[in-house]
Amino acid sequence: MLYNETENKQRKAMGLMKLNLAQKNLDAMLVSKPENIRYLTGYTGDTGMLLITGEKQYLFTDFRYEEQAKLQAADCQVVTVKGDYVEPICQLCSGTVGFEGRAMTWSQGDAFQRNQTDCRWVDISGWLEELRAVKTEEELALIQRASEIAQEAFWQTLEQVRPGLSEREIAAELDYRMRRLGAERTSFSTIAVGGANSSLVHGEPGDYRLQNGDFLLLDFGCVYQGYCSDMTRTVGIGSVSQRQKEIYRIVKEAQQAALEAIKPGVPLCQVDRTAREMIEKAGYGDRFGHSLGHGVGLEIHEMPTLSPKAEGVLKPGMAVTVEPGIYLDGEFGVRIEDLVVIRQEGYLNLCSQTPKELLCIG
């Protein structure tokens, strides 16, 4: 569906109402990152640029998206462009103009500055991402629905899992189930890796077929009305070893400790440190080499980040993953990931429909 009235109303309570050009001493702002354009306008096309000048918004696109832009971005004046966007946009720019340097190519940025030398161009990369980090209740409801779809698909897929199935077959089954349950698409390429492959942090599903005694690591999520979900579960195939159970226990307890540390005002790095210190104390610190978590919303990885060097604190309305792991090269890996929403009183776990006790199937 190209036009969703409910989403359009929700959007009016989101980005544009939060935006304040004067806060950045800007006369205008040029937005080129697709997720940020959607956040501010509701437009879902993958081609376009948004120019905001005071009280007016111009959405530039081409003929392929003209009708869609007019339907979705009701608050914008849609400008259909043939060829390059630079000249028609520059004709409307004046004063100090913010632009997203990280979302533009060098040649695009250079073209704008050469064509409008009267403007002062200021890189505002990250500003809109900071605004997006704290979600409205409408946004959080969409993320929660995406998470519910993913969890139901997980349970349905587990009913099909057995020794002899390939990683690729399991990933395809999980993707199919999420689509059937209402997802627009997966929020990233589904990870389904078994046996020794489960030690690959971002392993790709291949032809390996599950055997008794394997761990199967599933990292997956879906998109619902533009918003992503993300979760990871590690399950045993048949009977697993005591060593596997012990590593699973360490990861589970580290994740639980990090979850218990979550509340508004807590430094982002402190949440990471809570889980990391437990894994280090167990002797596997060098086998947990990624950050503890990341924000989730219109993008699968967005602000904030739960990492050792992260700056800032948790705020109500943020949606973040909590995903410690231990990866033993050539043996197996364990990761447990929940997606949680920060609340005034602590957090809400959006993955509570899938318990984290070690589940062995087949």
Image: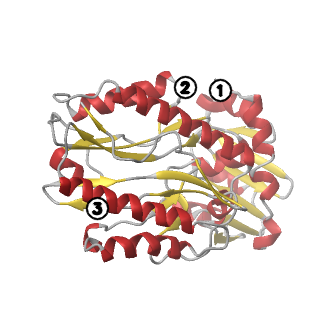
Depth order, front residue of 56/209: 209
| Real-space Cα separation, disc 2 to disc 3, in angstroms | 33 Å
Choose top left, top right, bottom left or bottom right for residue 172.
top left
Q: Residue at x 34, y 46 (%)?
A: 358
Give the image location of residue 51, x and y in percent: 72, 53
Q: Is residue 324 above or below residue 11?
A: below
Depth order, front residue of 308/114: 308
Q: Residue at x 65, y 48 (%)?
A: 37
Q: Residue at x 53, y 32 (%)?
A: 149
Q: Which residue is mark 1?
A: 2
The 10 Å Cα crowd at callout 3, few under 14, some 14 to 19, many 20 or more, is many
**Which badge, 1 or 3, is on the more N-terminal residue?**
1
Q: Which mark is residue 126?
A: none
Q: Which residue is mark 3?
A: 326
Report the quarter where the C terminus lies: top left
**Which badge, 2 or 1, is on the more N-terminal residue?**
1
Q: Is residue 196 above or below residue 144?
A: below
Q: Is residue 354 above or below residue 336?
A: above
Q: Which residue is mark 2?
A: 182
> Mark 3 falls on what kind of element?
strand
Give the image location of residue 80, x and y in percent: 68, 36
Give the label, 2 or 1, closer to the camera.
2
> Mark 2 falls on what kind of element?
loop
Give the label, 2 or 3, closer to the camera.
3
Q: Is residue 110 visible?
A: no
Depth order, front residue of 156/268: 156
Task: Locate residue 277 relative to residue 140 in the image: left or right.
Answer: left
Give the image location of residue 117, x and y in percent: 67, 69
Q: Residue at x 26, y 28 (%)?
A: 169
> Mark 1 falls on what kind of element?
loop
